[in-house]
Amino acid sequence: MPVSRKTYIRRRFGVFGGLGIFLLAAFYLPVTLLAPLPAATATTVATTVPDNPAVELAWPGFGSSAIGAVGFPGVLASSGPTTPRTIASITKIVTSLVVLQKMPLSEGTDGPTITMTSADVELYYSFIARDGEVRPVWAGLSLTQRQLLEVVLIASANNYAQSMATWAFGSEDAFLTAAAAWLSEHGLNHTTLHDSTGMDPRNTSTTADLIALGKLAIADPTVSSIVAMKSVNLPYFGTVNNTNKLLGIDGVRGIKTGTLDEAGACLLFASDIEVDGHPVTIIGVVLGGPDHPTIDAAIRALLASAAKGFRELPLVTAGEVFYTYSTVWDQSARAVASKDESALVWAGTTVTRTATTASELREGHTGDTVGAVTFSVGGTTVSVPLDLDGTVADPGPWWRLTHPFG
């Protein structure tokens, strides 16, 4: 029986309607079920940077002084003029380090044997004439390189300092050329040497350069071990006592005294302390004191006050919240610090939170790292990962189907 026009049209609508529904389902379902979820909204949680107040130091009432510490950049604090001053026998630290760069000593070894000559005897008498600190010498006397360093650094013998420099470089002038290059290489641009002993008052440096020099001295195993010795027994000389009378007091283990009319009494020193279980080596210098007993007492007071300036500063606590994530399908989680973190700091050092990053999040599980919080502590950067403290899950097919646009 022929199909009526009305039936025909209804069937056509049915076919095309069904096809339309099929096509809509074919495209709509994948688009909604497989489309990327909208990113969760990350909201910053207000936090505070820990306070790090300054400390009052007991500075000497004379000359120039400064303190630093191994592992801490530059000078931590200073008092008095910062321009170059005469450094006297602190020069011998430079001399020893320059010689050791040319003639290195392996740890635990004594180095080559050095035989004194008539030229060394002449040096001895020339320094006596200038009222300089000396130790006896004669032609044919033999000492190892380490013993020579011990006479120079412990007894502060000027004649042996110049003899050592001449042995290593051939002449005093050649040594001075090498010393200038060494000073430049190590960034000690405000230190000038005119001799290897410190008898020349034109040997000058700044407290900042001397703090850097002290760090170099303590880092050198040979120099560091020698300057810490209260005395040493040497052939021909017997017991040689250190000119640094602070050794062994308040953790002091070096470094070098200096005494000259133009310089006054000087001391470049190192002191080991402990701060909340962390070892700290303070490097300090005092120039231009009236005499050594006076500067020794002043240094003890300075060290006692400086020890209070180091502290372990908590930066962040595990679980501390820095971001909250919330989704349009009503799930939420927080970005929290993954661990406790602290820093050993000097009082007054600026502590800032330089960056806090949060990754774009659509799904995540507890413990997933989603960012980091970064602190600047002086010249050091400390970064702590931020982890999710909960799960952000896919909302499921029904939510996707009913929220095609997120």
Image (tube, rainbow, N blue to C red):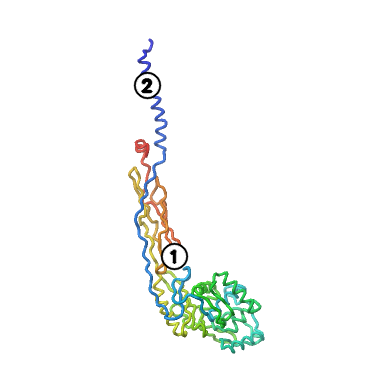
Residue 105 seen anywhere in this rendered image of the structure? no
Viewport quadrant of the C terminus:
top left
At numbered mark 2, what does the secondary structure look like: helix, strand or loop?
helix
> What's the residue type where badge 1 is placed?
Gly
Rendered position, 184 above or below 336: below
User: Which SS class for mark 1?
Assistant: loop
Q: Which mark identifies residue 378?
A: 1
Q: Are marks 1 and 2 in contact (CB under 8 Å)?
A: no
Whole-percent x, y for residue 291 in the image: 47, 85
Specify the quadrant of the image occupied by residue 106: bottom right
Query: Residue at the top extreme?
Result: 1
Q: Mark number for residue 14?
A: 2
72 above or below 171?
above
Front one among 389 and 305: 305
Q: Earlier in the sequence, mark 1 or mark 2?
A: 2
Displayed quadrant of residue 185: bottom right
Could you tell whether 363 is left or right of 131 in the image? left
Q: How many marks?
A: 2
State the CA–CA distance, disc 1 to disc 2: 77 Å
Q: Tell me the quarter of the image containing the N terminus.
A: top left
**Can I make out residue 106 in this image?**
yes
Dot 2 crowding, Cα within 10 Å, few <14, some 14–19, many 20+: few
**Position of residue 75 measured from the top left corner of the image (x, y, whole percent):** 46, 71
Q: Which of 192 and 305 is in front in this view?
A: 192
Q: Position of residue 37 (x, y in %)?
A: 39, 41
| For discs 1 and 2, the disc positioned in front in the rendered view | 1
Horizontally, residue 390 falls left or right of residue 183, namely left
Q: What residue type is labelled 2?
A: Gly
- Residue 134 place in picture, x, y as percent: 57, 86
